[in-house]
């Protein structure tokens, strides 16, 4: 026969049939006792034991009811830690539901698996017990609850007709308040609590608006005119375009200019006879006047050029001088100077990169060599602490003691020659 129906009068019902029927009314679990209530498992450090408080539970349609605290022994520890499990064990063959401790695997942190068959042994977990290596007692912190709780039916009532002894989690619709409520273990609480904006946590500081649209009439503060946004036009679309375009103010680097002349003749200009502050010199290369000409004011001047580039006339009258003393110059130092011929180094134009060849075959002295002659340092010019040039205008002064010494030698030789000639005559 493939179909069975029950229970009816005068009909024998098996334990399996009853269990299957009752499982549809209520799932397996512990009745009430959230926290330290029904069948709560704990340890107090008293030896290798855990304790289970009184309570009621349903396991696969069968009931268990305990009225006293039940101690359970945990197997002795060894050198490896393990995790045990406290269970309610349904054994239909023995017609019993008992408390039991399932011993875990040494060295593993995973509790032992539950046996849960449909018609045979079924284990409902209550707690796990961490058993440390070589421990002699179980601490409170070693026990972690695993209880499952029975469900509750959904009810309906008024504030005056609520259930008198509800279980934790009992849910119902209160017609007096027109709201859902549940029993939290000590009072009836609204299923949906009233929320105040100030009490909300983790709320965003700003809210990005979702994509939406508005009718033009709904927009406020809109402008009366709209400047055109950036856009482009083809040249053929433009009206009243000019035929020519004067260039705007701009600049070019020297290297970007093409067809530029190699030399630049100076424009017509004049200079006063004497250079004053801010004046420039005319034709400093000396070609302005041929040598046969005379100065327009009757006076020619040597010119000094200061390090800053300023020109000035070289004056020598006594009226311009003071502290005048003899200056001793060693003729032998003067005779140490070495005339040389040399080539100027090529120069590179920093803007164009053009190489400008230096003058070749110049005749003169080397300022560094003159500087090494101790008595002639006054002929040397320095710039930024380094040897730079020579005062060629003072070379005549340096040569005077040489000429004077030679004049005295000539005069002496002539006197000696006159005496010899007189003696021989």
Image (spheres, grey):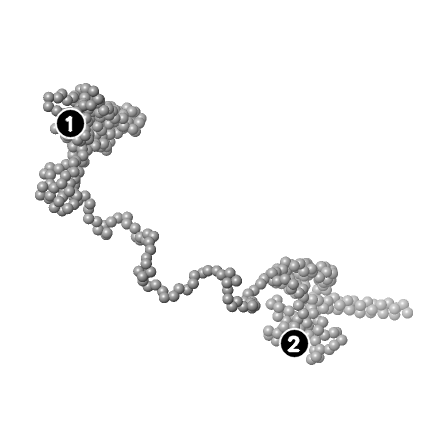
Q: Nearer the viewer, residue 283 or 55?
A: 55
Q: Residue at x 24, y 25 (%)?
A: 116
The quadrant in which residue 286 appears is bottom right
Which residue corresponds to mark 1? 63
Q: Residue at x 24, y 31 (%)?
A: 142
The relative height of residue 43 versus residue 194 in the rendered view (above or below) is above
Q: Secondary structure at mark 1?
A: strand
The quadrant in which residue 353 appears is bottom right
The relative height of residue 34 versus residue 84 in the rendered view (above or below) is below
Compute the Cα span from label 2 to label 1: 130 Å
Q: Nearer the viewer, residue 148 or 396?
A: 148
Q: Secondary structure at mark 2?
A: loop
Residue that extends furthest to the right in the rendered view of this protein: 425
How busy is the neighbourhood of tag 1: few (under 14 within 10 Å), some, or many (20 plus)?
some
**Residue 349 percent coordinates (x, y):** 63, 60
**Residue 169 percent coordinates (x, y):** 17, 38
**Residue 107 percent coordinates (x, y):** 31, 26
Q: Residue at x 33, y 55 (%)?
A: 213
Q: Nearer the viewer, residue 281 or 253?
A: 253
Q: How many marks?
A: 2
Q: Residue at x 9, y 38 (%)?
A: 164
**Residue 115 percent coordinates (x, y):** 25, 24
Q: Contact, CB < 8 Å: mark 2 with mark 1? A: no
The quadrant in which residue 318 appears is bottom right
Tell me if I can see residue 130 in this picture: yes
Of the residues tagged 2 and 1, which is closer to the observer? 1
Which residue corresponds to mark 2? 270
Left or right, 280 with reference to 16: right
The relative height of residue 113 versus residue 223 in the rendered view (above or below) is above
How busy is the neighbourhood of tag 2: few (under 14 within 10 Å), some, or many (20 plus)?
few
User: Tag 1 or tag 2, which sits nearer the N-term?
Assistant: 1
């Amino acid at each position: 026969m493939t179909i069975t129906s029950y229970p009816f009068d005068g009909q024998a019902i098996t334990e399996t049939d009853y269990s299957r029927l009752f499982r549809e009314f209520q799932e397996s679990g512990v009745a009430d006792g959230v926290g330290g209530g029904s069948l709560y498992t704990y340890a107090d450090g008293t030896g290798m034991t855990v304790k289970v408080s009184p309570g009621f539970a349903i396991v696969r349609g069968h009931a268990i009811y305990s009225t006293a605290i039940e101690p359970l022994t945990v197997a002795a520890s060894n050198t490896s830690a393990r995790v045990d499990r406290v269970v309610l064990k349904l054994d239909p063959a023995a017609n019993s539901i008992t408390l039991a401790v399932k011993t875990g695997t040494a060295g593993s942190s995973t509790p032992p698996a539950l046996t849960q068959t449909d018609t045979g042994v079924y284990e409902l977990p209550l707690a796990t017990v961490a058993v440390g290596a070589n421990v002699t007692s179980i601490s409170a912190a070693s026990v972690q609850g695993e209880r499952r709780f029975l469900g509750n039916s959904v009810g309906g009532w008024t504030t005056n007709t609520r259930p008198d002894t509800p279980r934790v989690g009992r849910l119902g619709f209160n017609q007096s308040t027109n709201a859902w409520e549940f029993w939290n273990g000590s009072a009836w609480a609204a299923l949906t609590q009233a929320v105040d904006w100030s009490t909300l946590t983790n709320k965003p500081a700003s809210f990005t608006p979702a994509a939406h649209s508005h009718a033009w009439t709904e927009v406020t503060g809109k402008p009366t005119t709209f400047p055109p946004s950036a856009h482009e036009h083809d040249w053929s679309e433009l009206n009243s375009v000019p035929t020519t375009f004067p260039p705007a103010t701009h600049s070019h680097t020297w290297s970007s200019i093409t067809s530029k002349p190699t030399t630049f003749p100076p424009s017509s200009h004049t200079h006063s006879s004497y250079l004053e502050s801010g004046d420039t010199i005319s034709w400093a290369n000396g070609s302005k006047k041929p040598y046969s000409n005379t100065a327009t004011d009757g006076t020619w001047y040597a010119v000094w050029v200061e390090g800053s580039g300023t020109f000035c006339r070289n004056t020598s009258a006594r009226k311009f001088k003071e502290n005048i003393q003899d200056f001793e110059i060693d003729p032998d130092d003067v005779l140490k100077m070495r005339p040389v011929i040399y080539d100027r180094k090529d120069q590179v134009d920093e803007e164009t990169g053009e190489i400008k060849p230096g003058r070749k075959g110049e005749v003169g002295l080397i300022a560094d060599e003159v500087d090494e002659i101790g008595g002639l340092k006054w002929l040397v010019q320095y710039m930024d602490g380094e040897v730079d040039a020579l005062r060629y205008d003072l070379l005549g002064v340096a040569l005077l003691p040489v000429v004077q010494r030679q004049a005295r030698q000539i005069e002496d030789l002539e006197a000696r020659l006159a005496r010899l000639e007189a003696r021989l005559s």
